[in-house]
Image (tube, rainbow, N blue to C red):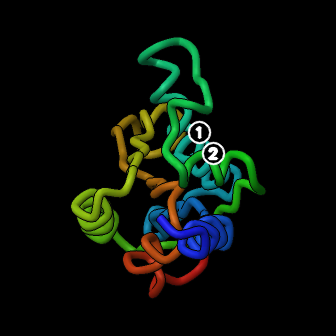
Amino acid sequence: MHREEQVSQEISVHDRVYKQVIVMRHDLKMRRGKQIAQGAHASMAFLASRLKVSGVVSMNEFDEASQAWLSGGFAKICCRVDSEDELLAIRDVASQQGLEVHMITDSGKTEFHGVPTNTCLAIGPDESSKIDAITGELKLL
């Protein structure tokens, strides 16, 4: 590889923007505190899923996008959908595009009359452009 090409690739890696998007069901009319808790669960699922496997998490276990996000400002965007069907459709598209997706299903103990309910999901972290292709048209929460 020529030096110019290597420098160009290094610059492009550092110029990329990374984020995680939380998609919340707006139709459930959750209390604000409940929304915040569910969104936090979704965001943390990214790390918790790895801890469940090995009990320890190392930066070396993450891909470039995840490392950049973890080393940066943990950018998160919160969007909303108006139904479970919309939430599931976004999950399916994101998964098909190879993005990491974590669905949160509330146990229903404090809301939802004891019925386990899909409340939100997290996509990423990954390159903003990849996530925006799926969530870019959603309304902000």
Query: Are the two marked residues, 1 and 2, in contact with CB atoms closer than 8 angstroms?
Result: yes
Q: Which residue is mark 1?
A: 44
Q: Is residue 23 above or below residue 125?
A: below
Dot 1 surroundings within 10 Å: few (below 14), some, or many (20 or more)? Answer: few
Dot 2 surroundings within 10 Å: few (below 14), some, or many (20 or more)? Answer: some
Q: Residue furthest bottom?
A: 137
Q: Which residue is mark 2?
A: 40
Q: Position of residue 42 (x, y in %)?
A: 52, 46
Asked whether the viewer can see residue 77, the reply is: no
Tag 1's secondary structure? helix
Q: CA distance from mark 1 to mark 2?
A: 6 Å
Q: Position of residue 110 (x, y in %)?
A: 54, 36
Q: Nearer the viewer, residue 67 or 91?
A: 67
Q: Nearer the viewer, mark 1 or mark 2?
A: 1
Amino acid type, callout 1: Met
Amino acid type, callout 2: Ala
Label tally: 2
